[in-house]
Amino acid sequence: MLPDKEGEELIKELSLLENNKNSKIIVLSGEQDIQKRNFLFEHGVVDYLSKQAPLKDLVEEIDTIISDILTNNKSSILVVDDSSFVRKTMKLVLSVKNYNILLAADVQEALEILKKQQVDLIFSDIM
């Protein structure tokens, strides 16, 4: 809760600003509301931290998040799943953390991608 509006409203407005598409948002909250947390992740929030943690731990966590964001763009992740919903969700969650995301709907598509470039991690549906 901010004095002039709720944080969720600010995040919605930020996500609509064209010049703010690449900004990374970390939320610091006194609440442990899972629904609110999920809403925030769906709107591009990188992480959701609790104010109840000791300040030293919060500073270290924020520093780690920032360091990861700055280096994650060197890593490529291939998501292989026949569900477009799963592929889009994984892309949303991982892109915010600055990873390069590649998507494949099936094995053949995944193999074509792997012939063209190296990936660091593969998330794959097994069924």
Image (cartoon, rainbow, N blue to C red):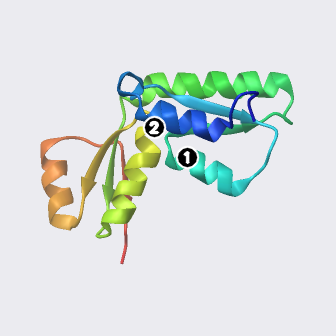
Q: Residue at x 75, y 36 (%)?
A: 1
Give the distance between the C-alpha atoms of the residues marked 2 and 1, in whole angstroms.
Answer: 9 Å
State which tag comes first along the sequence, 2 or 1.
1
**Residue 18 marker:** none
Determine whether label 2 and label 1 are within 8 Å by CB. Answer: yes
Looking at the picture, how far across and down is residue 78, in whole percent?
31, 50
Q: Residue at x 45, y 35 (%)?
A: 15
Q: Residue at x 56, y 30 (%)?
A: 25
Q: Residue at x 42, y 56 (%)?
A: 89
Amino acid under label 1? Phe
Q: Is residue 26 above or below residue 124?
A: above
List the residue tagged with mark 1: 41
Q: State the image quarter where residue 47 is shown.
A: top right
Looking at the picture, how far across and down is residue 114, in whole percent?
19, 49
The secondary element bearing badge 1 is classed as helix
The secondary element bearing badge 2 is classed as loop
Amino acid under label 2? Val
> In the rendered image, which quarter contains the C terminus?
bottom left
Q: Is residue 94 left or right of residue 34?
A: left
Looking at the picture, how far across and down is residue 88, in whole percent?
35, 55
Along the line of sight, the residue nearer the viewer: 51 or 118: 51
Q: Examine the rendering and report whether any part of residue 124 can be seen.
A: no
Number of residue marks: 2
Q: Is residue 27 left or right of residue 92?
A: right
List the residue tagged with mark 2: 96
Looking at the picture, how far across and down is residue 80, in whole percent?
30, 61
Q: Is residue 80 above or below residue 68?
A: below
